[in-house]
Amino acid sequence: MRSVLVAALTALIVSLLSTPAVVRLFRRRGYGQEIREDGPSSHATKRGTPTMGGTVIILATLIGYGVAHLVVVGQPGRGPTASGLLVLYLMTGLGLVGFLDDFIKIYKQRNLGLRSKAKMIGQTLIAVVFGILALSPWLEDFRGYSPASQHISFIRDWEWLTLPAVVVIVLIWVIITGTSNAVNLTDGLDGLAAGASMMVFGTYVVISFWQFRYNCTSYAVAGCYDVRDPLDLAVIAAAAMAGCIGFLWWNAAPAKIFMGDTGSLALGGLVAGLAIATRTELLMIVIGGLFVVEALSVALQVAVFRTSRRRLFRMAPFHHHFELAGWAETTVIIRFWLLAAMCAALGLGLFYQEWLTAAGGG
């Protein structure tokens, strides 16, 4: 538990105190956000606000993780793990793809960075490497567990359904690219993605620590969890949650800095990585329900327009629909945060109810 608290406290301090310095640095260098031309007119005043603030969240998470392991150095079984390092690789790799996208936007002074095909290639390379390594027998522990499994998972593996490794890698690619793009689509209002991500990571702190507390290695009873490195995943989730909190202090409306694709792709990748490593891929759809709804709004908008030449929403992602309907930006943000909190609470409730049932207590 100490490592989880140290990771959170360290990441919070790094994020909270370093963000103003990053704001000043990016302003001096002219790293300002370009605004989509077809967006709400009220967003025009945001042009020039420093972007790429996601670098703060990534660094805060990495530093928090590192400091937490320095504090527990020498304790058996408490060093960096394969699952933890792979999830951090996924976050950092997708953050780099987002950084390239943001930098091109700044350099070319336009709202379009990497071409969609180039961005997808980058996401695919990162995701496929993650999938191959996560299933690799080289990274199996003494029980034969790898960071990812070849089973479909809701709250735990469905043991009766074993998939070929190639199929699992394709599914991992779908999960990672889908989640990272969903968070990216959600990042359209001040603090919306950071606040929602904070809630999702907070949920995964509880889930992964619970899996550690009732892991089959040390607590082999009904309802225990066969997860490779749950405590290390709790450390990462805590660091990311605190990093988002510190960043949100400066990103809340009116934002002093935006996370950019650097942050949204990284956070989406981290959510996907935690879901895969904790064997809760399908539960993630509930926990991150806001991200799912935002992505679906875009898919439905495109599908309806292509078939009927009419728009389902005034603008997609659909947080802009409510802005154009007359809601104040802060009203949209707060209500969407409430939606994100309800989704996270529902997911956590389903997780706990399943444990009660599996343990014979409900």
Image (cartoon, rainbow, N blue to C red):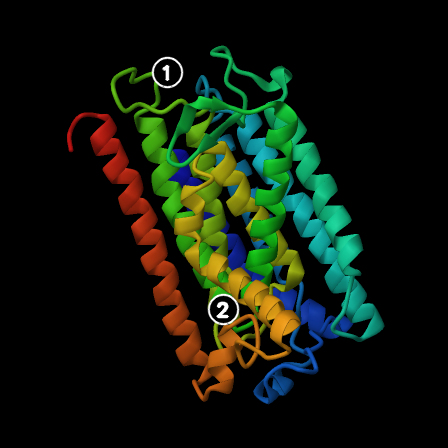
Q: Give the structural element (helix, strand or loop) at label 2.
A: loop
**Other residues around mark 2 within 10 Å, as few (<14) / some (14–19) / many (≥20):** many
Residue 217's disc is 1
**Which residue is drawn at the image coordinates 66% and 60% (left, top)?**
261
Label 1–label 2 contact, CB within 8 A:
no
Q: Is residue 76 left or right of residue 2?
A: right
In the rendered structure, which disc, 1 or 2, sits on the residue that comes first in sequence?
2
Determine the residue located farthest toward the left in the rendered image: 361
Number of marks: 2
Quadrant for residue 301, please give it: bottom right
Determine the residue located farthest toward the top in the rendered image: 142
What residue is disc 2 on? 191
Residue 213 point in image, percent of width and height: 31, 27
Query: Which quadrant, please, contains the C terminus?
Result: top left
Residue 344 point in image, percent of width and height: 36, 53
Query: Which quadrant, please, contains the N terminus?
Result: top left
Tell me if residue 254 can be seen. Answer: no
Q: Is residue 60 left or right of residue 44?
A: left
Q: Is residue 215 left or right of residue 318?
A: left
**Other residues around mark 1 within 10 Å, as few (<14) / some (14–19) / many (≥20):** some
Tell me if residue 357 can be seen. Answer: yes
